[in-house]
Image (tube, grey):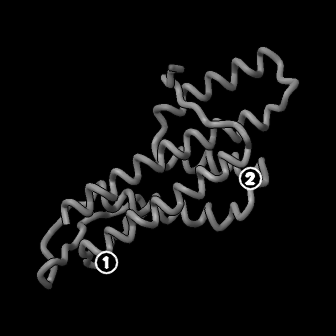
Amino acid sequence: MAAAIGHAVSGFGFLEEALKRAIFSLTRQGLGEDVSEKELEKWLRRMEEIADDTLGTLIDSFIASAKRAKADDRQTLADELTGIRLKRNLLCHASWRPGSEPGYWHPTFINTRGERYPDEMNAKDVRKIHADTLRISRRVVSIMRATGIEGELAGDEEE
């Protein structure tokens, strides 16, 4: 179970990077070719700020950017990203207790609305979350690539 959770958490890290790069591409595309120096500087400052954004904030920024860019199937992707956000919070913040059957664990977690996660989970459940996270990440990357602008991150260096 611990290995499955570790893999799932690494998938969330990959999703964060994909979102940052997609936000870079979508927002840069939205500036257009005739962007003023002032607008470009403001945009660059924002791109530096997203380096520290949380997954939830990145999801919100990406959804807004995808909406402005009229990305295909953005509502379905927005719904999936919202679901992944909740699962990330569960996996990363829960206290895990043995479940009622061998191989099952109960995540003790109360979300910001005071709700408890009711179900026990096993490694297969966590591996599905990991697979879903990677599938959604690939979709985010495909939206980035469709802009024709490879997303960059603050700190990326040219070789």
User: How would you rate the neighbour count of disc 2 (Cα within 10 Å): few for under 14, some for 14-19, many for 20 or more?
Assistant: some
Amino acid, disc 1 = Pro
The answer to whether residue 26 is left or right of residue 100 is right
User: What amino acid is labelled 2 in the image?
Assistant: Lys
* Element marked by disc 1: loop
Q: Residue at x 54, y 44 (%)?
A: 58
Decide which of 23, 86 is in the foreground and name it: 23
Q: Position of residue 56 (x, y in %)?
A: 49, 49
Which residue is painted at 12% across and 73% down in the image? 98
What residue occupies the far front of the structure in this picture?
159
Residue at image coords 30%, 57%: 7
Residue 137, percent from left and from top = 52, 55
Label 1–label 2 contact, CB within 8 A: no
Residue 12, placed above or below residue 123: above
Q: Residue at x 32, y 63 (%)?
A: 110
Tag shown at residue 67: 2
Which quadrant, please, contains the N terminus? bottom left
Quadrant in which residue 126 is drawn = bottom left
How many C-alpha atoms fall within 10 Å of the one at disc 1: few (<14), some, or many (≥20)? few
The residue wearing badge 1 is: 118
Residue placed furthest toward the top:
37
Which label's residue is closer to the chain start, 1 or 2?
Answer: 2
Q: Nearer the viewer, mark 1 or mark 2?
A: 2
| Foreground of the two, 82 or 21 | 21
Compared to residue 39, the image places residue 63 above or below, namely below
* Rendered view: 157 above or below 15: above
- 9 relative to 56 in the view: left or right: left
- Give how far across and how far down residue 31 sits, in percent: 79, 32
Q: Circle 2 sits in a helix, a strand or a loop, which is it?
A: helix
Q: Determine the image quadrant of residue 114.
A: bottom left
Q: Is residue 112 above or below residue 144?
A: below
